[in-house]
Amino acid sequence: MVDSVLFPNPVQVPTNRTPSRTKQNSDAGTVSPFAKVLDGKMPSQGITFSQHAQERLKERGINLDKTEMEKLAGAVDDVARKGGRESLVLLGDAALVVSVKNRTVVTALDRNSMQGNVFTNIDSAVLFK
């Protein structure tokens, strides 16, 4: 014989449930903690300069204008699409060694400093006139 099972208080599933997500503020300036972490992990689209590169730019009198910075960012994008990791970018009178993964200029040389130098640990080069 089979015994019947009785549930004295049957489980009721509410039909108008609200999501259990945390409420987001409607303020445009509010950023969730997840967004902050994500922004920190995602590479920025800009180019940064290491402390070493900043010192070399200053002592060698190399100034990059907005157009040159856009060319540099485009070059880094192109190299990244082709799988490059460390690139030499020749831009005007400057030679810049760039870590593509970090989008960071590692060092910079002017035309006089380039003479006779051997560039090592690079896997690509981009040349601009």
Image (tube, rainbow, N blue to C red):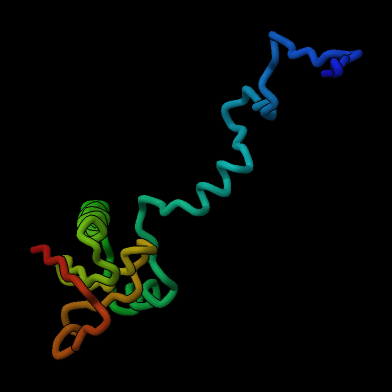
Please say whether residue 49 is visible from this viewpoint: yes
Tell me if 106 is positioned left or right of 110 in this view.
right
Front position in the image: 67 or 40: 40
Q: Position of residue 98 (x, y in %)?
A: 30, 69
- The N terminus - image quarter: top right
The residue most toward the front is 1
User: Residue at left 74%, top 14%?
Assistant: 13
Residue 80 quadrant: bottom left
In this picture, is 51 found above or below 112?
above
Residue 21 quadrant: top right
Please say whether residue 65 is visible from this viewpoint: no
- The C terminus - image quarter: bottom left
Tell me if 10 is positioned left or right of 106 in this view.
right
Front position in the image: 117 or 36: 36
Q: Position of residue 104 (x, y in %)?
A: 36, 65
Residue 95 quadrant: bottom left
Tell me if 8 is positioned left or right of 16 in this view.
right
User: Residue at left 27%, top 81%?
Assistant: 121
In this picture, is 55 found above or below 17?
below
The residue most toward the bottom is 116
